[in-house]
Amino acid sequence: MFSKIKKDFPILKRKINGKRLIYLDNAATTQKPIQVIKAIEDFYKKHNANILRSIHTLGEEATEMFEDSRKKIAKFINAKKEEIIFVKNTTEAINLVAYSYGRKIKDGNIVTTIMEHHSNFVPWQYLCKTKNLEFRVVDINEEYFLNNDELNSKIDRNTKVVAFTNASNVLGTINDVKEICKTAHENNAIAVVDAAQSVPHLKIDVKDIDCDFLAFSAHKMLGPTGVGILYGKREILEEMEPFLMGGEMIKEVSINETKWNDLPHKFEAGTPNIADVIGFGKAIEYLEKIGMKKIRKHDKKLTKYALEKLNNDKIIIYGPKDVEKRVGLVSFNIKNVHSHDVADMLDKKFGIAVRSGHACAMPLMSRLKISSIVRASFYIYNDEKDIDALKKALEKIIKIFN
């Protein structure tokens, strides 16, 4: 199945500097299958209209298609459709929670971890500074997992929010999301999960893990950019004030008072990214046709293969050794070579696209005593040949610099 998938991705036919494109930057954004591209094109050609407003044919068609995507996404993570809020990206989803839920926090502490993407670190840090709350950060151990003793000691009866990543965008580490949510709830705190790197790779059931909020992005799972998802438990969303105010998030407006709309529209002010939400619905269909269990199996196979092939005394690899406990990415450095130099040469000489830099995780970089990494991340259209090409390219780069 996976060997035939590449044909669905037009961009993979492209050559970069005379070489076939080997795209290994999927943790940043994935490529889009033709089915998603056509869905967006079809909307603009045949159905373009604003939603939830007009009663003409195009308006009703657009609204139905948009809400159909919401239903698909809700089913994908086992949520109710009114618990699915459309935003721009994971970052906006977490900021929505930090602003709207955080507004009512008066005292106590907020707990996050050293392995967070800035999106799930900076909003909580800022909230703590502005409201004079204690900001607590859980460290990792030498095996690149969260320090459980420290986690359990830092979450206490004064904790209001536990915000953590399901899977690290640098280390690949998969955290025990269900157990951390349980610990948060035992201390009457809410659990906010950054699932940007997990929903594309793992089967996520929000009812099973019992998180209060879960944030992820369409563009990391074959969908378009500009579409993010915030899942929130209905009873909590009902109690929260809106983040943005204006069109469609209202039920009634008078000179003296405004009444908010019902969920989920209460948090979706103004005209949304209609075509791309519809495109995301097609991406969900595509992933479900393959099956998340098969995608996870493919991930583990490629990650195991990459860890074996990149085993070189000149290469430092970060993250757990056990592929059962990591998602499909490998972060590394070549000794005495800057990550940007490695990434630049991979692109210009070999047509290989990887991420380099601090990966929006500067606290983690400081913890690891490094300034940056090179990250190769895999998805459904990657195969062993891509990793073989990466290995050969890195060996040549090592020879050049040594």
Image (cartoon, rainbow, N blue to C red):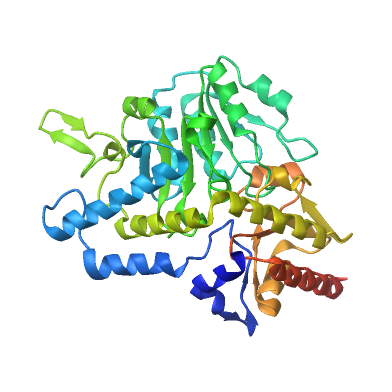
Q: Is residue 114 left or right of residue 110?
A: right
Question: Where 226 sits versus 345, above or below?
Answer: above
Image point 32% across, 69% down: which residue? 41
> How many numbered markers are drawn?
0
Check the picture and name the quadrant holding the N terminus. bottom right
Observer-nearest residue: 5 or 106?
5
**Side (left or right) of 303 relative to 98:** right
Q: Residue furthest bottom?
A: 18
Residue 93 in view here: yes
* Horizontal and vertical percent position of residue 132: 50, 24
Residue visible at 51% across and 17% down? 188
Relative to 311, say whether 87 is above or below: above
Quarter location, residue 402: bottom right
Image vertical order of residue 80 relative to residue 89, above or below: above
Q: For residue 335, what is the image quadrant?
A: bottom right
Q: Position of residue 349 (x, y in %)?
A: 70, 79
Q: Furthest residue to the top? A: 157
Along the line of sight, which residue is nearer the eye, 396 or 121?
Answer: 396
Q: Measuring 15% from the left and 50% from the top, which residue is drawn there?
A: 53
**Image point 58% across, 35% down: which residue?**
164
Q: Position of residue 246 (x, y in %)?
A: 22, 42
* Lateral position of residue 118 relative to residue 46, left or right: right
